[in-house]
Every structure is written in structure tokens, then in C-alpha cells.
């Protein structure tokens, strides 16, 4: 078998390509080892750091000691009661008037013989109420739900006491200011 000049060149090019591939593989192995070391260091660092995501529990004691955090607004519902028994017709008319006149995002619920409209904030409640009273005044009664004030227990207070005053004026003012925070 005779070796030609082309076959000798092919063997040499194959050797050169093989050497280049070996060099690239060595570089890739070094990079892989460095990445593994970095991953180990990052895992150790994450394990050492405490969990920084903490949500505080807003209770009455926290609010009075640390000031006023953002408290969710208490939005009243709008209650629509039909004069007659056709509540489904009233529901569709309420949807229609809210969409046409106000174009506000509201939630409509049907409860027994009432339609309850929930709004996002108090300003929306007023505009929706006016629009509904305009259109549905003949077919239904439109009312805004009345919310009761929260009950607060007064410390060192008795209803039936024989002594004159148990609270000093300063204590009374502090209690009134605490109630007015809400």
C-alpha cells in the first residue's frame, strides 16, 4: 500500500484538529471546576444569611406603639332591593347602568332578594350610588350599607361606680386620642 501526499496531509490535519480539541476540552474542564467552586461558595453564603422577608403582624398594640401603618379602607356596599319580585331583571338593569354611566370596576352579587354592589373605594361608592338612584328609583330602593364603629374596651372603667372619677383628665385625653387614631 502506498501512501500518497494527500493522505499524509490528512493525517497531519487530523492530528492538529485533535490537539485543538484536547486544548478546548481542558479549558472547558477548568471553567466547569471554577463554576462548581462558585456555586459552593454561593450556597454557603445563602445558608449563612437569615431570611430577610418578614411581614409584620399589625395588631392593636403594634399600631399604637409604632405609629399608623397603612390600614385597609373600610368601603361600604350598596344594597339594591327590588319593589317587586323580579330580581333578575333588576340585576341586569343595575349592570347596564353601572357600565354605561360610571364605567367603574364593581362586583355584583345576588343575595336572596337583594343585589349587593361592591366598589373599590368610597369615591366610587358615591358615584355608583348616584347613577343607580337616577335610573332605578322607580323599580328599586338603593341604599348604602351603614357600618358600625368598632367597639373599644376602656381600661379601668366601670359603669356603676360610687366614687366620683377614676380617670384623671390626662388619662381621659390619652384615651380619646387613642380612639381617634382609627
Image: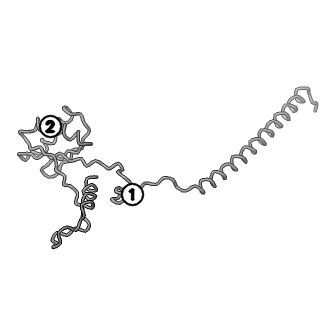
Residue behind mark 1: 57
State how many labels appear: 2
Q: Is residue 147 above or below residue 142?
A: below
The residue shown at (51%, 53%) is: 52
Check the picture and name the quadrant holding the N terminus.
top right
Residue 182 shows in the view? no
In the rendered structure, the answer to whether residue 115 lies left or right of residue 28 reads left
Q: Quadrant of residue 159?
A: bottom left
In the rendered structure, the answer to whether residue 2 lies left or right of residue 32 reads right
Q: CA distance from mark 2 to mark 1?
A: 38 Å
Q: Quadrant of residue 152?
A: bottom left
The percent position of residue 168, horizontal first and vertical second, equals: 25, 64
Disc 1 crowd rating (10 Å Cα; few below 14, some 14-19, many 20+) is few
In the rendered structure, the answer to whether residue 73 lies left or right of residue 117 reads right
Residue behind mark 2: 130
Which numbered marker is on residue 94?
none
The percent position of residue 54, horizontal first and vertical second, equals: 46, 54
**What SS does tag 1 mark?**
loop
The percent position of residue 104, horizontal first and vertical second, equals: 25, 36
Residue 2 shows in the view? yes
Q: Quadrant of residue 20?
A: top right
Residue in front for this viewpoint, 110 or 104: 104
**What SS does tag 2 mark?**
helix
Residue in front for this viewpoint, 83 or 25: 83
The residue shown at (20%, 41%) is: 125
The percent position of residue 79, horizontal first and vertical second, equals: 15, 47
Disc 2 crowd rating (10 Å Cα; few below 14, some 14-19, many 20+) is few
Farthest residue toward the top? Answer: 5
Q: Nearer the viewer, mark 2 or mark 1?
A: 1
Amino acid at each position: 500500500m502506498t501512501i500518497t501526499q494527500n493522505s499524509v496531509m490528512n493525517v497531519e490535519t487530523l492530528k492538529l484538529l485533535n490537539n485543538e480539541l484536547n486544548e478546548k476540552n481542558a479549558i472547558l474542564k477548568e471553567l466547569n471546576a471554577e463554576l462548581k467552586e462558585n456555586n459552593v461558595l454561593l450556597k454557603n453564603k445563602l445558608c449563612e444569611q437569615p431570611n430577610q422577608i418578614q411581614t409584620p403582624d399589625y395588631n392593636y398594640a403594634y399600631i399604637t406603639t409604632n405609629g399608623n401603618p397603612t390600614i385597609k379602607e373600610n368601603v361600604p356596599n350598596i344594597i339594591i332591593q327590588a319593589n317587586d319580585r323580579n330580581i333578575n331583571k333588576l340585576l341586569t338593569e343595575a349592570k347596564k347602568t353601572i357600565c354605561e354611566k360610571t364605567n367603574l370596576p364593581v362586583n355584583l352579587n345576588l343575595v336572596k332578594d337583594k343585589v349587593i354592589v361592591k366598589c373599590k373605594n368610597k369615591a366610587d361608592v358615591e358615584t355608583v350610588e348616584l347613577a343607580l338612584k337616577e335610573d332605578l328609583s322607580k323599580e328599586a330602593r338603593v341604599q348604602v350599607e351603614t357600618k358600625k364603629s368598632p367597639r373599644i374596651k376602656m381600661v379601668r372603667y366601670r359603669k356603676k361606680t360610687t366614687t366620683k372619677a377614676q380617670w384623671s383628665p390626662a388619662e381621659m385625653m390619652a384615651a380619646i386620642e387613642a380612639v381617634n387614631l382609627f
